[in-house]
Image: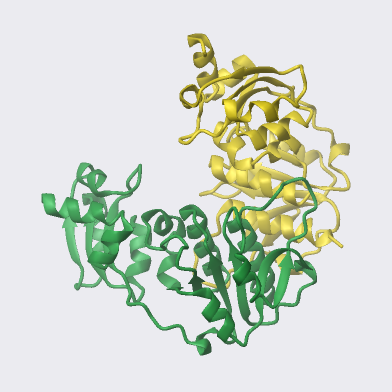
Chain colours: A green, B yellow
Amino acid sequence: MLSKSQISLVTSLQHKKFRREQGLFLVEGYKSIIEFAGSPYQIHTIYHTPDVGPKLLNLSRNINFQEISINELQKISALKTPADALATVYMPQDTDLLQADLKNKFTLVLDGVQDPGNMGTIIRTADWFGISRLICSEDTVDVYNPKVVQATMGSLARMTVNYTDLSTVLTNSSLQVYGALLNGQNIYHTDFGSEGLIVMGNEGNGIRPEIEKLITKAVTIPKLGGAESLNVAIATAIFCSEAAGKLSK
Amino acid sequence: MLSKSQISLVTSLQHKKFRREQGLFLVEGYKSIIEFAGSPYQIHTIYHTPDVGPKLLNLSRNINFQEISINELQKISALKTPADALATVYMPQDTDLLQADLKNKFTLVLDGVQDPGNMGTIIRTADWFGISRLICSEDTVDVYNPKVVQATMGSLARMTVNYTDLSTVLTNSSLQVYGALLNGQNIYHTDFGSEGLIVMGNEGNGIRPEIEKLITKAVTIPKLGGAESLNVAIATAIFCSEAAGKLSK
């Protein structure tokens, strides 16, 4: 049986302000929870329906478990159709971003991506291609937004995310800074090598002028048909594919 | 002022059954409506707020225009946040699918894609890469679903879509049939040439076994990280990029 204060705490985590205050965020669904349980993230409590209890009990004993009914789950879930379990998970400490961490790999840099579904899909796609770090401008959508977490399908558990001033990071970097821009080099003729930063812009406005100045190689996905633009998650996927995917044997 | 029967007609078009009965579907937003007005599609009526009236009046005189308030638009819109205009558009006649139409180009074949957002994004992406035909299994989500139309951002106006029995089409085709499958050839080592059918499967279950049998070249996007799968719209984009995008100069 859930107490009023539990319901109030969990539902408050749908809002960024309360996530910061409590230092917790929501992960829903058994499969995603398992991914977080097997990662450096620390789970606080798992609220689960009777159906998934036995499966979950194989997890660490440092986690609180509470069996609840599907009606109770509905009350605390951020989803229209709740899954089978919901976990409250500790937000990691902000980690310093060291330039050395960016060497010998590709890192995605997001300048103001707003849509939670796009953000989640970007994380899931980056994870598929073995990209494990994301650097976001301060106004990029919060990765701990329940809709983002949901759309990552567990991939957030494997992603290191920094929110920071992009100008500082890009100015201090000795790496190639690729940017998705119009009138850049054809992406299919671009040699990405084996490391670099890949900057993607906001859904409507693209990359900000002050960030665009710091891009060392403008790259374009050539338009062969009539669409005015590509969705940012789709464009990011094509960059991940061309840069990281190509390195597959 | 909208009549009750107008409200009832327009809102009924959110349902496939009534779209088929009326032979009409909904397009929302000035920018998308302009794309359909400049295509072979025939628009029935444009309901518009006072703000966009003058712009729209440059369109063909064979279209009915009706100025309505934003409150009235809210009543007939399928969107949470209605745009500035809504059009009812005639559904095209089913066209025969001729094998000759598939030569010298790439065509997407969707086997049971269910999510309207995925479907819309697939159409928008295909349109970017100059792919203008989609062949769908009968159980694939209806392209005239308002959520699909919305997500295509006007690209549906440039796409020919057939719903048909995929087995028949693939059996009769002399073209290469590429399929997104596990354990296929690495997509980055695949030469797509300049024509062929590209089969993508359902979000959860992939391509049906009876369709898989008809694939002549299984192709895989190699997994370099931890994600269990790629979203189907993302996977489709990478196939479009590798097959059609590569042909860009």
Image quadrant where residue B89 sits: top right
Quarter of image, res A26: bottom left
Q: Is residue B188 visible?
A: yes
Identify which residue is drawn at 56% across, 71% down.
A108
Q: Is residue A248 visible?
A: no
Check the image and report above or below for B38 versus A148.
Answer: above
Residue A16 is situated, as x and y percent measured from the top left of the image, at: 33, 59
Farthest residue toward the bottom?
A100
**Image x and y of residue B123, in percent:** 67, 43
When the figure is inspected, residue A155 is found, relative to residue A29, above or below; the finding is: below
Say which quadrant the C terminus of chain A sits in: bottom right
Question: A68 left or right of A23?
Answer: left
Q: Position of residue A192 (x, y in %)?
A: 70, 77
For this rendering, which residue is in front, A210 or A17?
A210
Residue plotted at (24% across, 72% down): A60
* Image position of A78 (left or right of A200): left
Which residue: 52% across, 74% down?
Answer: A166
Expressed as whole percent of the image width and height from the top left, the position of residue A144 reads 37, 62
Please, is residue A174 above or below residue B22 in the view? below
Q: Residue B18's quadrant in the figure? A: top right
Q: Is residue A22 above or below residue B156?
A: below
Q: How many marks?
A: 0
Left/right placement of residue B153 relative to residue A96 reads right
Foreground residue among A120 and B167: A120
Q: Residue at 50% x, 30% y: name it.
A: B78
